[in-house]
Image: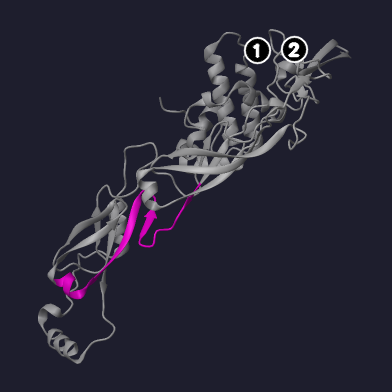
Amino acid sequence: MAKRDYYEILGVGKGAAADEIKKAYRQMAIKFHPDKNPGDKSAEDKFKEAAEAYEILSDSDKKAKYDRFGHAGMGGGASGGHGHMNMDDIFSQFGDVFGDGGSPFESFFGGRSGGGRRQAGVRGNDVRIKVKMTLQEIAAGAEKKVKYKRMKVADGLTFKTCTTCNGAGQIRRVTNTFLGQMATTSACPMCHGSGKIVDKRPAGAGPDGLTPFEEIVTINIPAGVADGMQLSMSGKGNAGPGGGPNGDLIILIEEIEDPTLKRDGHNIVYDLYISFADAALGTSMEIPTVDGKVKMKIDAGTQAGKILRLRGKGIQELNSAYRGDQLVHVNIWTPQKLTADEKAILEKLKEADNFKPHPNKNDKGFFERMREYFN
């Protein structure tokens, strides 16, 4: 099922400012909040969908990539629908959207229905790495085995019940107002909502009970990614302090420049240099492509600047069956040094009628031909 446009989900335009996006999300979150719609699966799905949209559009870097590439630019982090965000991730957004009180339903009604919700603790930081790829790997997709460092919970670490909240993970306060008593709840500042704190910490572990280690992961990168695009692997980042959930591994794609083939969107551009004789008589030449070398026929009388096309030899569009073409730009190589015999031959030929230029009024210039091709 195709994913809905994030701007459409929040009901804002593409040029919406950060405050407008936040306001729209606040309204959606209140409308479809699980506490306001108990047992309503449709409302919960809309709640998660709005949270995913806000997660992308509230982050300037993610928003820029989404505006440029759409859902494909979100890579693995957003390819699986709004299910990739759990409820703890979503409720963690409320600190920014609604203030320190978190969810408006926690602030005004004393916690979520059913006795309150224990938070999972502080989420671990994301880990960011770069993966370099050749143009050939980008065209075909690649499996990359990567070693990187992240933080994990130290072996032998034990926890005990938080003495500040007695394991509840929340602090409840009751204040008197002119409307009567009002109860508010917030995450425990000692255990950050997990309900537990470090008890016995092994040697070498930090105060949060975490220790560095090296991990090796295999990353399956789909065909069609682009330089600067980000993919993510959920839960492969740093462990959260106090037993909190892991962050993600963010993979930044870095394209290695190819010495002969140039990428232009989904197309590949190649400059072919041929001799005057080959252009006049015609020939067959091997052309490099991302799939290997292929033979291409050069017709007799081929003019400099002509653009030949190899269909389907470009880059595949991400998450699509469409594949671009390879455009071969023909250049006529003119020798810079000639022998006496070569000069004599050319002197005779240049007087021949066929060797005098005959401009064709219908011949299109290079840019006209390019415009015609893309239209």
Estimate the x, y position of residue 165 in percent, counting from the top left: 81, 17
Count residues near mark 2 (Cα–Cα under 10 Å), then give few for <14, some for 14-19, many for 20+: some
Residue range highlighted in magenta: 253-280
Q: Mark 2 falls on what kind of element?
A: helix
Where is mark 2, residue-wise?
109
Please tell me which residue lies in front, 285 or 266.
285
Please tell me which residue lies in front, 129 or 298.
129
Contact between marks 1 and 2 (CB within 8 A): the answer is: yes
Q: Report if residue 94 is visible in the image.
A: no
Q: Real-space Cα distance between discs 1 and 2?
A: 10 Å
> Is 330 left, or right, of 125 in this rendering?
left
The residue at 57%/8% (across/down) is 39
Please say if 237 is above or below 311: above
Q: Tell me which amino acid carries mark 1.
A: Asp
Inspect the magenta stretch and tell me whether residue 140 lies in it: no
Where is mark 1, residue-wise?
35
Residue 367: image quadrant is bottom left
Q: Tell me which amino acid carries mark 2.
A: Phe
Q: Report if residue 81 is visible in the image.
A: yes
Q: Pick whichever of labels 1 and 2 is earlier in the sequence.
A: 1
Please say if 262 is above or below 138: below
Estimate the x, y position of residue 301 in percent, counting from the top left: 15, 69
Please tell me which residue lies in front, 70 or 188.
188
Please tell me which residue lies in front, 198 or 330.
198
In the rendered picture of this protein, how many numbered marks are placed on residues?
A: 2
Q: Mark 1 falls on what kind of element?
A: loop
Residue 176: image quadrant is top right
